Amino acid sequence: MNLKNLAKIVDDAALNAKPISQLSLNNQFSEKEAYEIQANSIARRYNRGEKLVGVKLGFTSKAKMEQMGVHDMIWGRLTDGMLIGQNSSLLLEKMIHPRAEPEICFLVKKEISKEIPLSEIKEYIYGVAGAIEVIDSRYENFKFSLEDVIADNCSSAGFVIGKWHNVDTPLEDLKMDLIINDEVVQSGSSNAILGNPWESVVAASRLCSKYDQIIRSGSYIMAGAATSAVYLEKNQIVKVEVATLGSVQFSIQ
């Protein structure tokens, strides 16, 4: 089994918007090897000129962890090629079966290279913002194992960031609505993100340092979803409203 070959398969699927069978159906690989596949896949993006701009967390709700039979979060990498501008458009044809999730994003002030305790984490963050993540599993029917989804960069496809706010902005129990064409389709609370979105930043510091991934100053940390993801279709305006953090939106063409 060649991990670089598996990375090419996943990367080609994302690049060409063509779904693939689960890698794990014909290949046995560990969680550690899944992260190696992810790193090799993202390296192919770097070779095409993309730059690393941050990380994202997955499985940040207890329900999702139980559903997947795991006891910890997963993480993936964000590149500048995934960044969707506020109020801009995303072409559906560049995706396979995209979904949107309401999230909170953190902007890193000081380099994070080790696990940071909750009591110190605000020292490393410049600001917080409401955000939308677009996930798009490269696997057929959006079906995957834990190792599959890690190898697929945790389904990362795009993200939109709203207005930045001070780190002292309260993040506890903020109402978070996902709105499509002026209709609220999902509503949740920021507490769904590990009980406290700041815990997601702590988790990012722990998980990334475990795999020797430095989170540099100026990077983004996407904290994880506050609700279930919603499928996206053409001619939609996708908006997230977060209490005290305001709104963020983009459209699907």
Image (cartoon, rainbow, N blue to C red):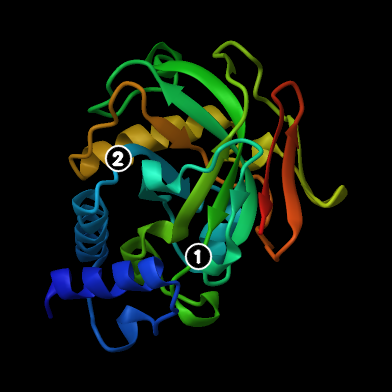
What residue lies at 55% left-to-right and 62% top-to-bottom? Answer: 66
Residue that protrudes farthest toward the right in the picture:
183
Mark 2 packing: few (<14 Cα in 10 Å), some, or many (20+)?
some
Q: Quadrant of residue 206?
A: top left
Q: Is residue 216 left or right of residue 169?
A: left
Mark 1 packing: few (<14 Cα in 10 Å), some, or many (20+)?
some
Q: Circle 2 sits in a helix, a strand or a loop, which is it?
A: strand
Q: Is residue 188 left or right of residue 161?
A: right
Residue 89 pos. (x, y %): 62, 49
Residue 25 pos. (x, y %): 33, 87
Residue type at the position of mark 2: Leu
Which mark lies nearer to you, 1 or 2? 1
The numbered disc on residue 252 is none
Residue type at the position of mark 1: Lys
Q: Is residue 79 visible?
A: no
What residue lies at 37% left-to-right and 73% top-to-bottom? Answer: 13
In this orientation, which residue lies closer to the viewer: 234 or 129? 234
Residue 153 pos. (x, y %): 36, 58
Q: Quadrant of residue 121?
A: top left
Quadrant of the image containing the N terminus: bottom left
Q: Is residue 28 left or right of residue 67?
A: left
What residue lies at 44% left-to-right and 79% top-to-bottom? Answer: 19
- The mark tally for this picture is 2
Q: Which residue is mark 1?
A: 94
201 shown above or below 108: below
Residue 217 pos. (x, y %): 31, 21
Q: Is residue 3 visible?
A: yes
Q: Is residue 232 left or right of residue 104?
A: right
The numbered disc on residue 52 is 2
Q: Which tag, 1 or 2, sits closer to the chain's start?
A: 2
Residue that protrudes farthest toward the left in the picture:
2
Residue that protrudes farthest toward the bottom in the picture:
26
